[in-house]
Image (cartoon, helix red, strand yellow):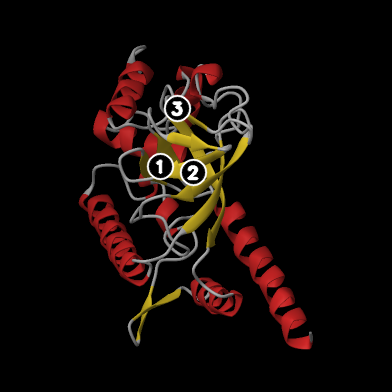
């Protein structure tokens, strides 16, 4: 393997606007094959694993200080400030502020079944690890890999389009976490199409762009400064759906009893 291969992969990831992983982490993410697949396939494999990783892993992002929130950013006494650099974050929680608790229960139950509605039509959505399949499982760069990736992308695009139509007037609140583990609340100031319950996954990576507004410790999200990169931490997503469903049902039940 060429000594500068991890450097080439990192440069390619940077050109796509992704978080900058360490060379050591890239080396560990490469498939254990000899000979290695072509560079484009390796980039795709490392990208998939990067988007499925926990950003707080100290070995992942390099250098950590340059990619984290600035100190005291969540201070509610600061009326308004701007991010002075791009900051990659991961999603820990999402809440649709325009839906009732019972509507949210129905939505999450549909997601757990792998379903979502489009008007009166129920459509099947990808579930489980389908978005996180490793290209190496079917052979990087092969027609089978390309076809599988195309199918996943088509399903994802349909999912995004349906959720965007259903959530056109919605406002979402998120909890975001940077690579140092700092958690910050975020609120949609203007609609960001890929943000929605059922389309935005827990653990999904988002790049907050330089110039994003922070008001009273809350990040204000808008398309110009919020880029959804994709990915998911599967165990987090499953735990979040189950835990949020339980909490919502408990609240709804308490409201009915009250």
Residue at screen point 36% across, 45% down: 222
Q: Would you name the residue on which mark 1 appears?
A: 48
Are discs 1 and 2 less than 8 Å apart at CB? Answer: yes
Q: Which residue appears farthest toward the top when viewing the image? A: 3
Q: Would you name the residue on which mark 2 appears?
A: 52
Instruction: Give the vertical position of 98 relative to 146 (above or below).
Output: below
Mark 3 burial class by Cα count in 10 Å: few <14, some 14-19, many 20+? some
**Mark 3 or mark 1, earlier in chain:** 1
Taking 146 as reference, is 19 left or right?
right
Q: Would you name the residue on which mark 3 appears?
A: 83
Image quadrant in which you'd find residue 105: bottom right
Residue at screen point 41% across, 76% down: 116
Pinpoint residue 71: horizontal percent, then vertical percent: 61, 22
Foreground of the two, 131 or 37: 131
Cα distance in 3D space between marks 2 and 3: 25 Å
Q: Would you say residue 202 is visible in this rendering?
A: no
Cα distance in 3D space between marks 3 and 1: 27 Å
Pinpoint residue 118: horizontal percent, then vertical percent: 33, 79
Q: Quadrant of the C terminus?
A: bottom right
């Amino acid at each position: 393997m060429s000594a500068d291969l991890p450097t080439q992969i990192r440069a390619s990831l940077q050109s796509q606007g992704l978080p900058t992983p360490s060379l050591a982490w890239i080396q560990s993410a490469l498939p254990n094959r000899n000979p290695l697949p072509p560079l484009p396939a390796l980039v795709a494999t490392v990208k998939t694993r990067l988007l499925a990783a926990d950003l707080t892993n100290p070995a992942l992002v390099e250098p950590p200080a340059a990619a984290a929130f600035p100190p005291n950013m969540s201070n509610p006494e600061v009326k308004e400030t701007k991010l002075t650099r791009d900051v990659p974050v991961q999603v820990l929680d999402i809440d649709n502020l325009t839906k009732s608790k019972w509507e949210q229960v129905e939505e999450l139950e549909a997601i757990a079944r792998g379903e979502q509605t489009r008007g009166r039509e129920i459509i099947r959505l990808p579930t489980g690890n389908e978005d996180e399949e490793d290209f190496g499982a079917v052979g990087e760069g092969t027609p089978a890999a390309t076809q599988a990736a195309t199918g996943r992308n088509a399903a994802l695009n349909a999912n995004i389009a349906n959720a965007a139509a259903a959530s056109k007037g919605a406002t979402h609140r998120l909890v975001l976490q940077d690579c140092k583990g700092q958690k910050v609340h975020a609120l949609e100031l203007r609609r960001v199409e890929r943000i929605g319950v059922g389309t935005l996954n827990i653990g999904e990576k988002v790049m907050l762009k330089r110039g994003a507004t922070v008001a009273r410790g809350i990040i204000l999200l808008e398309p110009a400064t919020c880029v959804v990169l994709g990915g998911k931490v599967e165990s987090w997503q499953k735990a979040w759906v189950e835990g949020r469903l339980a909490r919502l049902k408990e609240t709804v039940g308490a409201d009915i009893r009250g």
